Image (cartoon, rainbow, N blue to C red):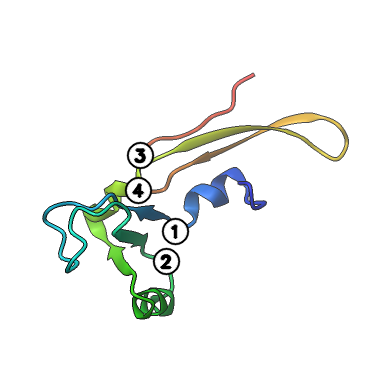
Amino acid sequence: MLRGFTAQAALDAPRLCISAGSPDSTAEGVAGDINSEVYFEEGIAPEVLDQLRAMGHDARLATGLGRSLFGRGQVIQKIVDQSGRTVWAAGSDPRSDGHAAAQI
């Protein structure tokens, strides 16, 4: 939302997650190192992942149930429109079954 997204567009956008690493990491030499793996959600261009890997990053694609590591969210935002009126905007994560409803 800081980049001008609406509440719903921010929740719809593909996410990334910087991992803290784990002993079962498949990245050689970095198991357990903080920030050793970066997970990307479907929707990130494969070329981006290829470029990051070419730079030496352990860029991974999270798919299916593996996407749960990105969490879930609902947003309610108070906005003052161009006329000066206060309006409410809401967005709900398409990855879950929740909803957001602005109530007055």
Give the label, 3 or 1, closer to the camera. Answer: 1
The residue carrying mark 2 is: 43
Q: Earlier in the sequence, mark 1 or mark 4?
A: 1
Seen at 38% across and 41% down, the residue is 72
Q: Position of residue 38 (x, y in %)?
A: 33, 60
The residue carrying mark 1 is: 14
Marks 1 and 4, how far apart at CA: 10 Å
The residue carrying mark 3 is: 97
For this orientation, the residue located farthest to the top is 104
The residue carrying mark 4 is: 70
Q: Secondary structure at mark 2?
A: loop
Q: Secondary structure at mark 3?
A: loop
Q: What's under tag 1, amino acid-wise? A: Pro
Q: What's under tag 4, amino acid-wise? A: Phe
Q: Is residue 72 above or below residue 51?
A: above
Look at the numbered discs 2 and 3 and tell me whether their residues touch, using CB distance below 8 Å.
no
Marks 2 and 4, how far apart at CA: 14 Å
Quadrant in which residue 63 is drawn: bottom left
Q: Secondary structure at mark 4?
A: helix
Q: Answer left or right for 7 relative to 60.
A: right
Q: Earlier in the sequence, mark 1 or mark 2?
A: 1
Marks 1 and 2, how far apart at CA: 6 Å
Count of numbered circles on the image: 4
Sort mark 3 into few (<14), some (14-19) or many (20+) by Cα contacts within 10 Å.
few
**Residue toward you, 89 or 13:** 13
Q: Earlier in the sequence, mark 3 or mark 4?
A: 4
Q: Is residue 103 above or below residue 50?
A: above
Sort mark 1 into few (<14), some (14-19) or many (20+) by Cα contacts within 10 Å.
few
Marks 3 and 4, how far apart at CA: 15 Å
Look at the numbered discs 1 and 2 and tell me whether their residues touch, using CB distance below 8 Å.
yes
